Amino acid sequence: MKPLLQRTISPVDGSVYVEREFASDQAIEAALAKAVSAQPAWKQVPVAERAAICRRMADWCVANADQLGEELTWQIGRPIAQSPGEIRGGFHERVKYMSGIAEETLADLAVEKKAGFQRFIRREPLGVVLVLAPWNYPWLTSVNAVVAALLAGNTIVLKMAQQTPLVAERYRQAFAAAGLPDGVFQFLHIDHESAARVIADPRIGFVAFTGSVGGGHAVQRAAAGRFVATGLELGGKDPAYVRADAPLQATIENLVDGAYFNSGQSCCAVERIYVHRAVFKPFVEGFVELARQYRLGNPLERQTTLGPLVRTDAANSVRAQIRDALNKGAKALLDPKADREGTPYLAPQVLVDVDHGMALMTEETFGPVVGIMAVATDEEAVGLMNDSRYGLTASIWTADAQAAIRIGDRVETGTWFMNRCDYLDPALAWTGVKDSGRGCTLSRLGLESFTRPKSFHLRLTL
């Protein structure tokens, strides 16, 4: 029998933190009908007014960031000292940027003048956009689609991951406080089977999915029966390359943070590092020294810098990758006794003597562990970075910007960083290649992806 309730089991202490009823078939139908009904009027609202509403929504979230952050800590286990930053930082930044470029980006596109004609291309909304958002950065991942789609004149139906249902409910509160018209934003607590039916519904004009590769395939299967576009932001196995001329202290600080923030539960976390042999030893020594300073513990305590993974089975999956690597000759550099077997509390780890015969270096890990390999040349580093079915982000650490551009041209990735990592710039397209997905969000291109072109070809005289 199909379960009627969804439960959020907190990784903090294993308790049931949230319990919600799944939406009934009647509730799903009502939400879709309401979204369709509300969209024509929303399309007519001036873009500047849409943008103002989105900014007010974000301001409400920032004003309530402490409460929202504590809820997030209970739902996913991120340290409470860090959780409000997701809202005050990247979430707010992206809303402000997208709202700021909306009028210019969505304006009619003029073409060459032609006597006796008026011609232009209008960016039309797609209709009802279904947003399927994950739990690991629920505000940051969802906002990329929610706000862009609304700015473009679409209505939204949001399905959050079952681990973070409160995020969807807080969005509704924030949009209500901002004055968004009824029916323009809605959410549904639904299971995968119901989500597949919604994807297949002809009233859905676009599906924006962020999640695993397996989830992306499921979305594609559900959408296969009709011509509906899908945007897929999937996983990563993101590499970093440390050249011999890299400023080591800053490089180490950034890469440790890029590997361990949010317990490594990020699609663009740094999961494998290639270091030039000339600086391999001091890099590894500095990396290990800094990694040892992380404090694994109760994420509700402010001194904690590393919280639990989202579930015990997720932590066990990472442990299995570590064991596989060790069995194949890898060496662990952090004390394994700090790990809490049988719980989601997984200690950070650094492995050396690794190679691409190990799952740790080729398959997504999604945990606080990184493998570090020595390389002799740029050529070797490029070959190893490209030896992956993923291509979300990659980074190079060097004092030579021209070398960074030259090497970046050869690396198969959606975003190429120099001297930074694990960050989304809202002015740049967020996209992936290979199994990391297709389509893009953020930037002008991402905003346009929630529209379709409509040509106006007017003969002025007969």
Image: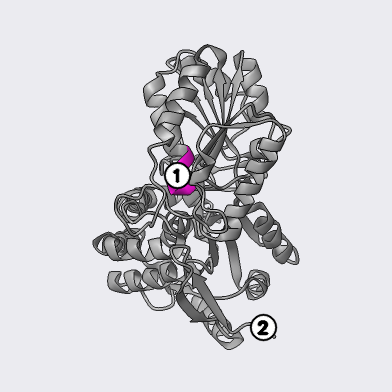
Relative to 306, 32 lies left or right: right
Is 140 drawn above or below residue 407 in the view shown? Answer: below
What colour scheme has been applied to the protein in the rendered image?
one colour
Q: Nearer the viewer, residue 195 or 44?
A: 195
Residue at position x 57%, y 58% in the image? 342
Relative to 174, 339 lies left or right: right
Amino acid on which disc 2 is placed: Lys
Secondary structure type for disc 1: helix
The majority secondary structure of the magenta stretch comes to helix
Q: Quadrant of the C terminus?
A: bottom right
> Where is residue 217 shown, x and y percent of the image?
71, 57
> Where is residue 101 shown, x and y percent of the image?
36, 48
| Disc 1 to disc 2, C-alpha distance | 41 Å
Residue range of the region highlighted in magenta in the rendering: 259-263
Relative to 246, 61 lies left or right: left
Residue at position x 30%, y 59% in the image? 55
Quick check: can you spot residue 177?
Answer: yes
What is the quadrant of residue 407 in the picture? Answer: top right
Q: Which mark is residue 2?
A: 2
Amino acid on which disc 1 is placed: Ser
Residue at position x 67%, y 23% in the image? 383
Q: Which residue is mark 1?
A: 443
Q: Which mark is residue 348?
A: none
The residue mark sitting in front, 1 or 2, is 2
Secondary structure type for disc 2: loop
Q: Quadrant of the N terminus?
A: bottom right
Q: Nearer the viewer, residue 240 or 315?
A: 315
